[in-house]
Image (tube, rainbow, N blue to C red):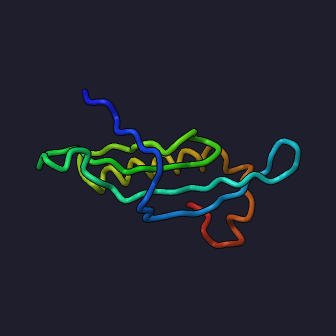
């Protein structure tokens, strides 16, 4: 098994948003969510796995690679990470419904 690619920064985002949650002290915490464009892990290989960089501030300490067998699979796996953050924090998220973009 190959080591996962290290991603320092997401340069080509396909989706970016900021969600807000209530902190324990009653204040508000901002969570910047960025999903990058999927790319082949090894562009030289036709059968390369794909990587989709994803960052969820407040949940991940740095951008991480969501891997997949193709670009759509990698993107779906990145969204599973975002959905997991939502599910873990949905009771504390604020302003989602008023914007009309609350996940189902």
* Residue visible at 80% across and 54% down in the picture: 28
Q: Residue 12's spot in the image, x, y percent?
A: 41, 62
> In the image, 94: left or right of 86?
right
> In the image, 90: left or right of 46?
right
> In the image, 80: left or right of 85?
left
Q: Is residue 24 above or below residue 83?
A: above
Q: Residue furthest right?
A: 25
Q: Residue furthest left?
A: 46
> In the image, 71: left or right of 100?
left
Location of residue 95 (image quadrant): bottom right
* Residue visible at 56% across and 40% down in the picture: 60
* Residue visible at 11% across and 49% down in the picture: 46
| Placement of the N terminus among the 4 image quadrants | top left
Q: Residue furthest top?
A: 1
| Placement of the C terminus among the 4 image quadrants | bottom right
Q: Residue 5's spot in the image, x, y percent?
A: 35, 39
């Amino acid at each position: 098994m190959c080591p996962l690619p290290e991603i320092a920064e997401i340069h080509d985002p396909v989706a970016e948003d900021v969600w807000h949650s209530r902190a324990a002290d009653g204040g508000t915490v901002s969570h910047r969510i960025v999903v990058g464009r999927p790319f082949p892990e090894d562009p030289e290989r036709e059968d390369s796995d794909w990587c989709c960089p994803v960052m969820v501030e407040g949940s991940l300490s740095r951008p991480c690679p969501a891997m997949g067998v193709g670009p759509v699979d990698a993107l779906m796996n990145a969204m599973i990470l975002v959905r997991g953050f939502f599910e873990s924090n949905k009771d504390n998220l604020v302003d989602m419904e008023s914007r009309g973009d609350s996940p189902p």
